[in-house]
């Protein structure tokens, strides 16, 4: 059974920092990433990390967010700095399973940035 477990969300003031983590189990994964969904908006890509360590970011978070991974532990992180109220959303971990050929989602963790 494939499972993704996230942690690290919370409430922070504008300009503050948070670090999210996500650990996958039940499979090996290659492409991994974070998405977010704000109230009334569609889910959007925040950041991705590929095999070999290549990363990709949404323009809105470039220079403020950093995605990293621990190969062999199926764990990824999202370090978020200089947070803005518009970063408020539910953040979802996403990993593509090598074993099952499909993507899986975490349960989501709430990030709220107050002004």
Image (cartoon, rainbow, N blue to C red):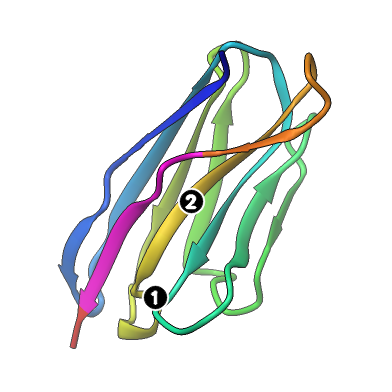
Relative to 104, 101 lies left or right = right
Q: Quadrant of residue 72?
A: top right
Task: Compare marks 2 and 1 and give the one earlier in the sequence.
Answer: 1
The residue labelled by disc 2 is 92
Residue of label 1: 87
Q: Is residue 2 magenta?
A: no
Count of numbered circles in the view:
2
Range covered by the magenta-colored residues: 106-113
List x then y, in percent, for residue 21.
Answer: 39, 37
State the separation of the CA atoms marked 2 and 1: 13 Å
Question: Mark 2 or mark 1: which is in front?
Answer: 2
Q: Main secondary structure of the magenta part?
A: strand
Rendered view: 90 above or below 60: above
Q: Residues within 10 Å of mark 1 (few under 14, many from 20)?
A: many
Q: How many other residues sit within 10 Å of disc 2, few (<14), some (14-19) or many (≥20)?
A: many
Q: Residue at x 50, y 23 (%)?
A: 3
Q: Residue at x 45, y 84 (%)?
A: 40
Q: What label sits on residue 35 in the rendered view?
A: none
Q: Is residue 9 above or below residue 54?
A: below
Rendered image quadrant of residue 74? top right
**Mark 2 and mark 1 residues within 8 Å of each other at the beta carbon:** no
Q: Is residue 104 left or right of residue 76?
A: right
| Location of the N terminus (image quadrant) | top right
Residue 75 in the image: above or below residue 105: above
Q: What kind of element bears circle 2? A: strand
Please state the horizontal and vertical placement of residue 47, each as a whole percent of the image: 62, 56
Which residue is more in the foreground, 106 or 51? 106
Residue furthest bottom in the image: 115
Does the stretch in magenta take in 107?
A: yes
């Amino acid at each position: 059974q494939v499972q993704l477990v996230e942690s690290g969300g919370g409430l922070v003031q504008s300009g503050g920092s948070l670090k999210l983590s996500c650990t996958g189990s039940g499979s090996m994964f290659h492409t991994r990433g974070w998405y977010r969904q704000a109230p009334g908006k569609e889910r959007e890509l925040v950041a991705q990390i590929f095999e070999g360590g290549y990363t990709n970011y949404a323009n809105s978070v470039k220079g403020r967010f950093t995605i990293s991974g621990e190969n062999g532990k199926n764990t990824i992180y999202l370090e978020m700095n200089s947070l803005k109220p518009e970063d408020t959303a539910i953040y979802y971990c996403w990993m593509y399973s090598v074993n099952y050929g499909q993507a899986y989602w975490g349960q989501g963790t709430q990030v709220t940035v107050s002004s």
